[in-house]
Image (cartoon, coloured by chain):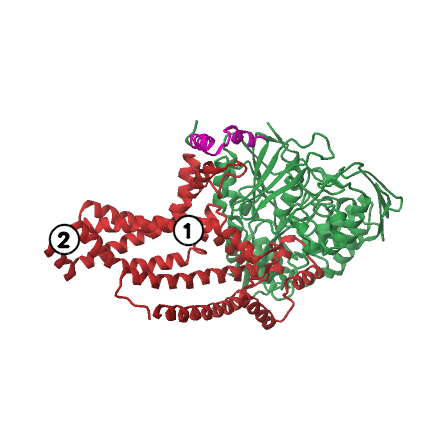
Chain colours: A red, B green
Amino acid sequence: MKRLQFMSVRLLQGLLALLLIATVNFMLVRAAPGDPVSIMAGEAGASDPQFVAQLRQQFGLDQPLPTQLANYLGHVLQLDLGYSYRQQQPVVDLILDRMPATLLLTGTAFVLSLVFGVSLGALASRHAGRAVDSVITVVALVFYATPLYWLAMMAVLVFTVQLDWLPAFGFFTVGADLHGLAKVLDIGQHLLLPALTLALFYMAVYARMTRAAMLEVAQMDFVKTARAKGVPPGRIQRKHILRNALLPVVTLAGIQAGGMIGGAVLTETVFAWPGIGRLMFDALMQRDYSLLLGCFLFTAAMAVLFNLITDFVYTMVDPRIELS
Amino acid sequence: MKRRHLIQAGSAAFGLSIAGVPLHTLAQSKKGVVNVLVQPEPPGLMMGIVQNGPTQLISGNIYEGLLRYNEKLEPQPQLATSWTVSEDRKTYVFKLKPNVKWHDGKPFTSADVVFSCDVFLRKTHARFRASLEQVESIKALDSLTVEFKLKQPFGPFMGIFENGTMPMVPKHVYEGTDFLTNPANATPIGTGPLKFKEWVKGSYIQLVANEQYHVAGAVTVGSVYFHVIPDAASRAAAFESGKVDIAPGGTVEYFDVGRLAKLPGTSVTTKGWEFFAPHSWLWINNRTAPMNNVKFRQAVWTAIDREAMAKIAWYGFAKPATGPFNSHIAFASDDVAKYPRDLNKAKKLLAESGYKGETIRLLPLPYGESWQRQAEIVRQNLTQAGIKIETVATDVAGWNQRCSEWDFDLAFTYVYQYGDPALGVSRNYTSSNIAKGSPFNNVAGYVNPKVDELFAAGAKESDPAKRKAIYAEVQKILVDEVPVAWLHEINFPTLYRNKIQNVVSSGIGLNDSLGRVTLA
């Protein structure tokens, strides 16, 4: 009952936040210089007043701004994200088209970074001060400090151009017409570099965080008590230390998960991965208002959703935490 | 065998036992395939509606005009096989090629030509509309004959029949519909050597051979893929790794072009841009002080080191411009005043202009590294001459906005000249073409009645010798008055693998040549 009440309050708050975000986004997007019509006129290499007026009318940009905002919010309340005139497709279709690629990439990176990050952090804390710890700490620091796009570019140069082991760009081999397992393998090859690139940064963060938190928890009285009771060291590590050290990791994982939809712009750009991050970036450059706002709203909704999920995960990791 | 091929072969073989994919399909489907880079992803492929660079690169091989043009921009038969011009140069009659079919199998006739020009493009195509002003009527005399009657002789008329200016669109698909929202725009139908097959947004566009193409034996490729790769360095890597066969002009940065051109089995050509004749310059806002003073404008032009820019920013793929006409277009004249870089002269001109150290806003064109470096060089040159420069950073939308609304002091641009001064030059200098809302008209706000008069006379004149004299005079005046500071004729390099032959076979280059390439 308590949970249900908590859920409904939070959901309502989330929806209000989303509506507010939609309004602010609308204003922000309009504050940027230029509009989709001037972009399209510019790209055409020639234009005249008739051309510009025709497009403005088609895009609904000839209406006063408050009317446009009211129209937009009205549509959002009906779950209608609008139509991208530039791409000649409904915004929802465009986003859903790109969703699988993005989720595959960010989901893989999420799992990779969490599994390896926490394992490496635990390993380092167990061997604190020794060679293993130093190696892990240094490697984590390097990946933490290296800009993502540089890492991505270097990976392409080494593994694609020099060694020719992996494909250079895209989601699958275009024109190969593969099916079944061959297709899965093909996508896997394409996925490897972008997923690793994206995972490395978070892996480093999780490793550092897990290590620090575990070392801290290891000093606490209940761990000493467990040790005094004769609990095996492996069990202490897992049940007593790791579990108690996981809370900050969960917080960060929640943030990473919330950014899964729109947070891979750089990686998607370098590897020509056809995901939502790129869709959003292109929409920004082209001032494709409805598409841009649609992407923003979608990513905001994901962030709100994962915030909620994170709260639930807290209660599972640490039963002392209550939802209220 | 490289490791990559082992993996590929391995996975294909593995797939064979599991999913029944024959190993040889992989090799077979590679046959007759050409992979091309495209940047950015086009907003649409319906060439009658969208005319940006990427759309022309792709759809120029789907749609055709009545004529093609060779590198010297001489008209060649395409959908029209012959044409006659009346004595008074006001009536043009085109004979169409018989038995030409649209990609959906319907016949192409004079009704399509009349519909395309008089109805469709009149509504959708701003640049064509400007030429259409000269046309009194367009009539089908019979199913394979079309007559254009002009209001008055129009010098460049024979130059507007390529597919970017006058693409033929199918009447049976578009008649009576809202052209801009017609769902058929997503599956373009033309008469060209390649047909639309598939567009996976964000990934690639696939065109396939048009087996019914009206020039027998012209199409020898099976498929052409246009790959959308948003990052310039990744595009270079894609070409370098051999996954892509053709990198059209502008798709890889100029500092990469030289390196990639040296790869084994690779060539580079600057042909295929003769019709567009890209010309770059610095807009000078003639409306306000100190830019409204001719001495100040001359000082700016004299201070800029265009030779160094051509070498440093463009890696040799640009030639300093001597005036408003790109040397590839008709009636370009070299008989004009010269403005070699001379800092002392620039300083002297600046002093004479009465410039008092006001801050001048410089608006770069955000089109990549070369443009960025070029802006840095100009900034340095002008600062050396004693002009106080403030660079305004912006993205493409912001550049468009500021140019269109005249919110700049100096702004970089480049413009296509479309083969003839009446089509691609006069629009930037005549006073009737001063209007907010477009970055491609007379943005500088330059007004000179004599120039207006000469450009008007040049357009009306159809005797080439007389046109030459008129345009020689107008070039002299413009170069003396420096309404803008001309920078370069840009020679866009096309990188390609030598196994692909006949890469450029016209004055618009890849735009209508890709369907005609052959694979060695």
**Amino acid type for the residue under numbered disc 1:** Thr
Q: Which dot, 1 or 2, sits closer to the camera? A: 2
Residue B119 percent across, percent down from the top left: 78, 53
Asked if residue B69 lies left or right of residue A174, the reply is: right
Residue designated by label 1:
A106
Asked where in the image residue B95 lies, by quadrant, the reply is top right
**N-term-proximal mark, 1 vs 2:** 1
Which residue appears at 62% of the width and 33% of the height?
B222
Looking at the picture, does residue B171 appear above or below residue B503? below
Q: Secondary structure at mark 1?
A: helix
Q: Is residue B14 magenta?
A: yes
Q: Secondary structure at mark 2?
A: loop
Which residue appears at 57% of the width and 65% of the height?
B355
Image quarter where the N terminus of chain B lies is top left
**Which segment did they paint magenta?**
B4-31
How many C-alpha atoms fall within 10 Å of the one at disc 2: few (<14), some, or many (≥20)? few
**Amino acid type for the residue under numbered disc 2:** Val
Image quarter where the C terminus of chain B lies is top right
